[in-house]
Amino acid sequence: FYVNPLVEDQEKRLKRNYFFLSALKTKTDKVTEVSINKAKETKIETLYSGQLIKKGHTLVGLCELHQEKTPSLFIYTKTNTWYCYGESTGGDVIDYVMKKNNCQFLEAVKILCQAN
């Protein structure tokens, strides 16, 4: 029997979202404001695995989120944010982990809290 890949992907997404919503309701996996603030204190440059070039208060490197030959990832150390000019996307440290690990908010906060 034929399974439409779009419907299958949508079902997987719904199951994954249901899992994260149910995890939020349990006390052991509860994300608090304290854990979010702790996660946001993690410096983005410590999560980057490549070489960064310092230009003032900005660090520049090849973006790990896509293949490229010229650096387009900018990490702004004063605000602990990033922006990739190749993909036209950016954000804070939690957004970076979500994009890099292809995960949801809850999992990204857990990863960052364990890194600290």
Image: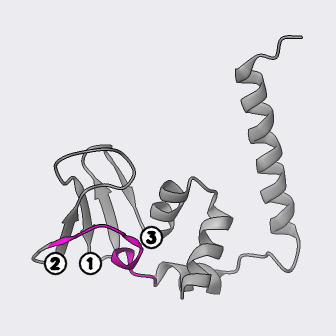
Residue at (59, 78) in percent of width and height: 36
Q: In the image, which disc is placed on residue 77?
A: 1
Residue at (24, 69) in percent of width and height: 51
Binning the other alpha carbons within 10 Å of mark 3 as few (below 14), some (14 to 19) or many (20 upward) gives many
The location of residue 65, given as percent across then percent down, is: 40, 51
Disc 2 to disc 1, how far (Cα)? 6 Å
Q: Secondary structure at mark 2?
A: loop
| Identity, as a three-letter code, of the amino acid under mark 2 | His
Q: Earlier in the sequence, mark 1 or mark 3?
A: 1
52 drawn magenta: yes
Up/down of 36 relative to 75, above or below: below
Evaluate if marks 2 and 1 touch, with contact meaning CB atoms under 8 Å apart. yes
Binning the other alpha carbons within 10 Å of mark 2 as few (below 14), some (14 to 19) or many (20 upward) gives few
Q: In the image, which disc is placed on residue 57?
A: 2
Q: In the image, which disc is placed on residue 61?
A: none
The quarter of the image holding the N terminus is top right
> Taking 107 as reference, is 28 left or right?
right
Foreground pick, 44 / 22: 44
Residue at (57, 52) in percent of width and height: 102
Foreground pick, 51 / 25: 51
Disc 3 to disc 2, how far (Cα)? 17 Å
62 drawn magenta: no
The location of residue 54, given as percent across then percent down, is: 14, 75
Q: Which residue is mark 3?
A: 93
Q: Secondary structure at mark 3?
A: helix
Q: Secondary structure at mark 1?
A: loop
What's the magenta region? 42-53
Q: Earlier in the sequence, mark 2 or mark 1?
A: 2
